[in-house]
Image (tube, coloured by chain):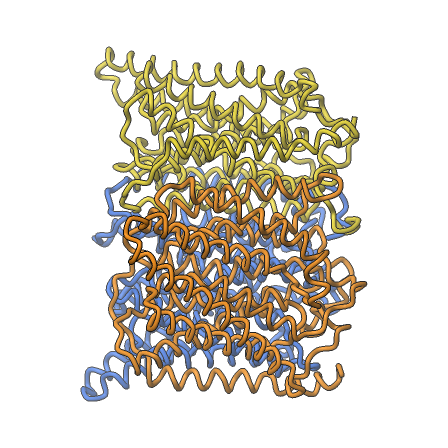
Chain colours: A orange, B yellow, C blue
């Protein structure tokens, strides 16, 4: 099977180049420069830095998969951003909409977060062609889901964008259910202290830039979004350390728990960051998100994943999925509390919010499942389980990686 | 004794969670959002990046202490920033003061520099509970010291904040004097080329962001502060390389000297960055700071520390302490030169400046000594000397760290 | 010979300190603060971060040369920026020019890119004194070349600055031709997976900040320059992955190709970034640049370098040199297309552009050759071939670097 993939490999670059040629041709017809005030450029750069650098290194915890984590992450992001901008421009043809290119680029980069999160769920189990196909499919479906939210459920675009973590996590999980599980005795599916440190580097980057991510699309309540996200993240980091001690045998810290729980607060606060009126609410959300992330990953390794035959390499279900569910619920509760005097309008609002949430998660699961089936077609030469989590399958090594 | 700590460990997370619960309750009563222009947000982010990422990796030079350096650094910073904001808000109840939340957050993050520097002095010798307690104590005392400077000595708040390095270094040294020295033959108290490289990563980050740190609190003379700091840092980096060759046996560069001396210039220029009129003055300050940092650490290993039985893990005395003393003296001299025509007013000014300096250093030393005594109470289960500088005491390792 | 250098080493720090003393004295006479709006400070910081951190880690791919790559890079940048600011101020005495200090600092840091690229060509083959001398010489010659472009060929200063990659690459190659080649069996002239990962860290940083680099000097068309550079870089990254598979034996990715080709697009787009009207043009430029970078480095290892006896450690010829040539040609072609209705004025414009290009490359080659001869004077104690690419020759190691 490995030799099948080797023959296949020679067609990979032509596929990539073909895709890029199509993109350039579409850019020729659709994209032209505009004049904008570039006040948001630093915010765009923060988001770009998060996605390319932060996630690239965040996913670098596998001991023999560092090159792919950061390299292929870069490849799918640069392809995905172009693809996402083009989808946006195609929709523009159908539907008049006045948006600046910078805003478009920011949204394209944010959408890529969904793809990168999905990548985390199948990390090391897919070949580059499958990942590129997944990127294109996921971006189209996520844009479609946002468009439905926008048009039929009257959810503002900057709020529907906050579904990005939810969508990415469940799309990734659904895909991952279609891939065979790695052998439980595989020693490649583990981290070393060194790879954990490099992953910590990415985590800290994500942590510092997360307030920018949650606030970049909100012009008016930007400072409030920043402040809520900061405190939510802070409490979730504190809780991560405390719970990590409580759930391990010797009462020691566990790096893997900390990596994921530290960010859970930012995900949960995302939905309501711009509207939470008191930071203590954001702080409690951060605390709950961290609890869910750690207890979740503690339980799922024992009870949830084995019967479902799910293998979620970077634990995206509990780092991004569940905290996003919590965030969406919290947003609804906060909405009810805020408008409880006017029950009729609350009814409408809540219905739309819950509808948007259910719709997004359903689309993610169904299309993810279908995408998983497509990716497993013989055409795409699924890699054999024995070659999972291995850089040497894709990368030329300068020499045998003894000290690696 | 190790087993004592193990039993104790189970109460650690409850202590952390209790603290966090208190913080959330206080936030409930004290903190509410405001509307601000967020022009200073990039500057806040620079400072936040410095403290969390820069110092986290700067302290990562010990070969078996990388997880704790960066991980526990993150823990104490997120706890400390909340604590520091709350102290500020409590003082606000007593004393009317009009400050924006963003300004409050920036000051809280800057105050954390003092704690991180103190951490550097006891790195690897304290357990997380002791560090958290130290954080809370130090923030209270430092705020008190700034308040006295403000109220009784009429030192502006943004200038009294610049005492942060001075306070951090001497508080840390005083605490460190209460901990037993590591065994001189301990091979864990050393760096590897790899840990030195990661520490260099943090150092370079700190270097690039230092001009933001020195200028963030000065609205009017901001550009001057940036420019002076940049040139001060540049000269101190050059001098660091030159002196590093002069003080080693074979005429080779020594990484440890360069790590510390490269930053000394930024510390020394800090006090007067906004007021130095010609950058050559900042450059000479940078040169002197670097000389002090390298000669100091060269001598202290030989003459100073052994009789005093002081063990200063990251050499904060000569990276942050002495350059800050130099900076404070330079500020006084510059003040005299500037106002020598009006001797009466100079007398007043100098008296206040010298008073502020003496007060800060005395408070740091006295309270640091007391804090050291408190931290050594049996209640806090001091870790045994044989377990110093060892990640495995606090962290679960994926497997035996052979290549680490 | 090694012992000769050892004796020589004792004079190295005095040379550095002497140079620094001269700089401080010149700053005393020439530099004073001004008041500026510091809107460009974030852009300056991006460029500074790129040069110090990005290039420092980008050059870290050699397995035993990490300390020197990042450390000596810092040393020559801090010296070089001061030197470059002073050259600017000296020219100011002759020629009235109204520039802010911040603009001066930004240009000084950008000019350092040329030096850092030249360093890449001789990485591991020069001692620090040779590098410092090279820095000073190159900055003087590059400023002279920009001044000629400015005065006699009427090329605007922000456009002549874009010759920085071209100049740096060919100056470095010309110098490198004067140094003996490393032994082909030298195992130090190679990378490990770990050093490749740290180099990837630098590459990703450079990638994210490159749009800032290309746009910082353009006030009016800044957003256009950012957008063109971003898409140019994106396509060049995609192409890099595709071609990397096509040119290796097993159809695997090769890290070294990706490091260089990913950035080629940014270099090629640099010249015309502010004036390209449609991003698809920038995208095609990025594609061509990536093709040139990879095919170039593929061929040069086989056909070009052996007969010329050229050894180009980091492949700057094909990462920065050839893409810059492509960019310059593209700029001329775009100029002709844009103004083809008015042929007489086009003639003038093209002549000036081509003249500026030929002049810059000739000056770079000739002065680089001369500089190479000077650096090889016995006075500067060229290091023996057996000590190439070795940190231990310059740096004290904490202990024998077993796991390095």
Name the residue rendered at 21%, 88% in the picture: C343
In the image: residue C302, left or right of residue A137 = right
Name the residue rendered at 32%, 33% in the picture: B274
Quarter of the figure with residue C178: bottom right
In the image: residue A8, left or right of residue A104 = right
Q: Residue furthest front?
A: A344
> Which image quarter is the C terminus of chain A in?
bottom right
Residue C172 lies, in percent from the top left, at: 51, 65
**Residue C304 seen anywhere in this rendered image of the structure:** no
> Which image quarter is the N terminus of chain A in?
bottom right
**Residue B146 seen anywhere in this rendered image of the structure:** yes
In the image: residue B263, left or right of residue A147 = right
Residue A9 lies, in percent from the top left, at: 66, 84
Residue C269 lies, in percent from the top left, at: 39, 73
Seen from the viewer's position, the closer of residues C366 and A304 is A304
Name the residue rendered at 28%, 52% in the picture: A342
Name the residue rendered at 33%, 51% in the picture: A222
Q: How many marks?
A: 0
Seen from the viewer's position, the closer of residues A3 and C12 is A3
Seen from the viewer's position, the closer of residues C284 and C25 is C284
Seen from the viewer's position, the closer of residues B365 and A380 is A380
Residue A97 lies, in percent from the top left, at: 27, 74
Would you place residue B391 above or below residue C238 in this image? above
């Amino acid at each position: 099977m490995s030799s099948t993939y080797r023959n296949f490999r020679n067609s990979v670059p032509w596929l990539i180049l073909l895709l890029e040629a199509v993109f350039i041709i579409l850019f020729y017809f659709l994209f032209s420069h505009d004049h904008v005030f570039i006040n948001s450029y630093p915010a765009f750069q923060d988001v770009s830095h998060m996605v390319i650098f932060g996630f690239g290194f965040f996913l670098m915890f596998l001991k023999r998969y560092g090159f792919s984590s950061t390299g292929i992450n870069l490849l799918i992001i640069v392809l995905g951003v172009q693809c996402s901008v083009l989808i946006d421009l195609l929709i523009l043809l159908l539907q008049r909409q006045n948006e600046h290119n910078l805003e478009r680029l920011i949204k394209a980069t944010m959408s890529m977060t969904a793809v990168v999160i999905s990548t985390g769920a199948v990390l090391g189990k897919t070949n580059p062609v499958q990942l590129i196909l997944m990127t294109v499919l996921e971006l189209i479906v996520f844009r479609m889901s946002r468009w439905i939210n926008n048009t039929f459920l009257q959810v503002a675009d900057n709020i529907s964008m906050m579904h990005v973590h939810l969508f990415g996590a469940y799309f990734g999980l659904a895909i991952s259910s279609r891939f065979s599980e790695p052998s439980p005795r595989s020693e490649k599916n583990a981290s070393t202290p060194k790879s954990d440190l490099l992953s910590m580097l990415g985590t800290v980057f994500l942590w510092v830039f997360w307030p920018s991510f949650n606030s970049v699309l909100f012009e008016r309540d930007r400072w409030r979004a920043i402040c809520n996200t900061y405190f939510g993240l802070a409490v979730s980091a504190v809780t991560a350390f405390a719970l990590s001690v409580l759930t391990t045998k010797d009462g020691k810290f566990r790096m893997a728990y900390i990596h994921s729980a530290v960010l859970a607060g930012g995900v949960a606060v995302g939905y309501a960051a711009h509207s939470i009126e008191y930071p203590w609410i954001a702080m409690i959300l951060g605390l709950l998100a961290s609890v869910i992330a750690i207890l979740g990953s503690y339980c799922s390794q024992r009870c949830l994943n084995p019967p479902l035959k799910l293998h979620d390499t970077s634990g995206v279900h509990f780092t991004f999925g569940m905290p996003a569910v919590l965030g969406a619920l919290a947003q609804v509760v906060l909405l009810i509390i805020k408008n409880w005097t006017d029950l009729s309008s609350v009814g409408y609002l809540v219905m739309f919010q819950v509808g948007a949430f259910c719709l997004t998660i359903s689309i993610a699961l169904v299309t993810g499942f279908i995408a998983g089936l497509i990716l497993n077609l013989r055409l795409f030469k699924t890699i054999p389980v024995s070659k999972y989590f291995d850089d040497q399958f894709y990368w030329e090594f300068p020499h045998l990686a003894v000290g690696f």
